[in-house]
Image: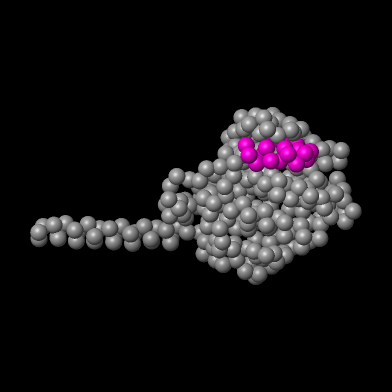
Amino acid sequence: MKLLKVIFTTILFLAVIASIYLVIIYKGSDKEKKVLTDADRKGTPGQYVKLSQGVTHYQIEGPDTGKVVILVHGFSVPYFIWDGTYEYLVKQGFRVLRYDQFGRGYSDRPDVVYNEDLYLTQLFDLIKQLHLKVPVDLAGVSHGGKVVTSFTCKHPELVNKVILIDPAYPSEAPSAPKLYTDYYEATHGDERATGQLADFKYPARHPEWVNKYRPQMQYKGFRNALISTMYNYNYNGRAANTCLNSTHKQVLLIWGKEDHTVPFAFSDSIRSVLKVDFFPVDDAGHLPYIEQADKVNTKIAEFLKK
């Protein structure tokens, strides 16, 4: 009996030591040291608006009379992912809006469940609060493709044309417990940042990409937004695209042929249920409108103008 007590006490002691060690590693590795405030936003480009779930960072340019185009970014890279396309479309005479989804960039990180409803409500509120001329054209890349697809199904009266760029298709929550995922994300923050380069076929051509990504990681709530989205954004690609097809919108589907983030083969799955103008892009990965900017931006403008 005494031996069992010693063994139990030893195990308990080691467990406590291990827990303390893990907490130290967690706290030391966690890049989220600051709370995002108005002071942090001062001097940043773009504008800010208070919506029902919090402050949203956005930028809008182009003539008031221009057709409104809204650019929706992907899972974790904020609106700078649209830099080249945004500038190109503004020069083409469109009224172009881009924004940071909640939890990303300089938008608020509300302590809520990051599900489909949150993302669709943010976009809906933005259209209404900025008094945009509807119907608008929507463009979404990767996770943003899910957002614009579902938004169009829910609010077809607000949408004219849809552009999907390498849109996320399969959606399965991680099999690991959320606690483990949170710990891993906190202790492997550099992986989250440097991993963004995998979206390019030629990552060496974008040496500034990781450093542009890192600033948002210092504000509390970024990691929670990503993890909550992973576990709570329920999306059935086939059903969503079937629904989009029923709205009879003109859809442009663009896909980098060498995309390893959302493989090119998923374009077949989408086209089996959704009528699209399909534009496959040679020599490009997950972000073909960046790697083949001239070709893809020209196609986008032509599609929006016709």
- State the residue at coordinates (65%, 45%): 146
User: Does any portion of residue 32 appear in the rendered image?
Assistant: yes
Q: List x then y, in percent, for residue 48.
A: 72, 64
Q: List x then y, in percent, for residue 218.
A: 55, 60
Whether residue 57 is in magenta: the answer is: no
Q: Is residue 247 left or right of residue 261?
A: right
Quadrant location, the N terminus: bottom left
User: In the displayed image of the protein, which residue is found farthest to the right?
Assistant: 65
- State the residue at coordinates (52%, 43%): 172
Quadrant location, the C terminus: top right
| Region in magenta | 238-258
Q: List x then y, in percent, for residue 170.
A: 57, 39
Q: Is residue 76 left or right of residue 43?
A: left
Q: List x then y, in percent, for residue 213.
A: 61, 52
- State the residue at coordinates (19%, 58%): 8
- State the residue at coordinates (72%, 56%): 124
| The quarter of the displayed image where residue 164 is located | top right
| The quarter of the displayed image where residue 122 is located | bottom right
Q: Is residue 280 left or right of residue 303?
A: left
What is the image's colouring?
one colour
User: Does any portion of residue 279 appear in the rendered image?
Assistant: no
